[in-house]
């Protein structure tokens, strides 16, 4: 799928559609720039808040998929403004290593440059 | 209320609390910088996308309040990341001049500088 001509809104819609199907991996390979910068609100233990590059960002996503059971997911948006869009995510998940089930409620801000997502920033609190 | 010492997360929580009570005017006077920049996803007819300064931004809010009946409002968040936070708004409203009732579904990105909100950006589509 060529995304060179897609608008920010179209890229947001494509991302949301793929995420609703659980195809997060495919969303990254088709819509993300090789130079994607991925920013967490909080650094995971022993890691940085910022991840640079598609390979490292996909590895982060793969780690998350491998360690969580997703019982239910809700994806809201996209909400565009100029070259950015916001998507909301609510996940009912179990963290496999601990067996703890919890709800992740977050928003993500995406920046588009030349038809590719070049930056994703995740907004959330750590207090549940 | 002094906000000089409030964190980004605390300011977001204060904003959400006031908006949930319908006290948008009070949210602006207590939490916004005099130099606030307010950015719409789309320019209203005959206006700019960007509004500069507290007085002009409050006038924009007052125009909106004067022209809409709010039947129901849902405010989600705040979702913080560093010096910014995202809030989601869903409004069931009637536009008084036309009598048209519709749902506004949007996200807003707020930037905090030195304990005051210095930038608000509204993300939405115009297609419903």
Image (tube, coloured by chain):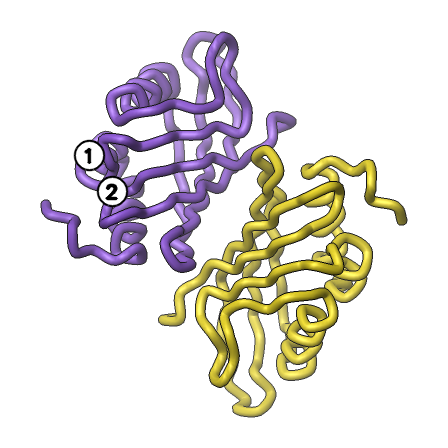
Chain colours: A yellow, B purple
Q: Is residue A91 above or below residue B6?
A: below
Q: Chain of mark 2?
A: B
Camera-side residue: B95 or A13?
A: A13
Q: Which mark is residue A51?
A: none
* Dot 2 and dot 1 residues touching (CB under 8 Å): yes
Residue at x-position 62% and y-position 38%:
A83
Q: Is residue A106 above or below residue B63?
A: below
Residue at x-position 63% and y-position 77%:
A64
Give the CA separation, mark 2 to mark 1. Answer: 7 Å
Neighbor class of circle 2 (other Cα within 10 Å; few <14, some 14-19, many 20+) is: some
Badge 2 element:
helix
Residue B89 x/y as whole percent: 44, 40
Query: Which residue is the site of mark 1?
Result: B26
Seen as rendered, the residue at the extreme right is A1
Q: Earlier in the sequence, mark 2 or mark 1?
A: 2
Horizontal side of residue B102 vs A23, given as left or right: left
Horizontal side of residue A53 vs B5, given as left or right: right
Camera-side residue: A25 or A20?
A: A25
Camera-side residue: B88 or B3?
A: B3
Query: Which residue is the site of mark 2?
Result: B18
Quarter of the image where the N terminus of chain B is located:
top left
Q: Is residue B57 above or below residue A14?
A: above
Residue A116 x/y as whole percent: 74, 48
Q: Is residue B87 visible?
A: yes
Residue at x-position 49% and y-position 8%:
B46
């Amino acid at each position: 799928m060529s995304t060179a001509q897609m608008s920010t809104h179209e890229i947001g819609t494509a991302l949301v559609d793929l995420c609703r199907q659980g195809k997060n991996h495919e969303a990254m390979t088709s819509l993300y720039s090789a130079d994607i910068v991925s920013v967490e609100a909080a650094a995971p233990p022993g890691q940085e808040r910022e991840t640079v590059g598609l390979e490292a960002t996909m590895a982060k996503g793969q780690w998350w998929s491998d360690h969580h059971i997703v019982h239910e997911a809700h994806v809201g948006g996209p909400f565009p403004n100029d070259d950015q869009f916001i998507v909301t995510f609510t996940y009912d998940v179990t963290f496999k290593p601990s067996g703890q089930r919890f709800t992740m409620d977050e928003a993500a801000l995406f920046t588009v440059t030349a038809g590719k997502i070049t930056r994703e920033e995740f907004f959330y609190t750590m207090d549940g």
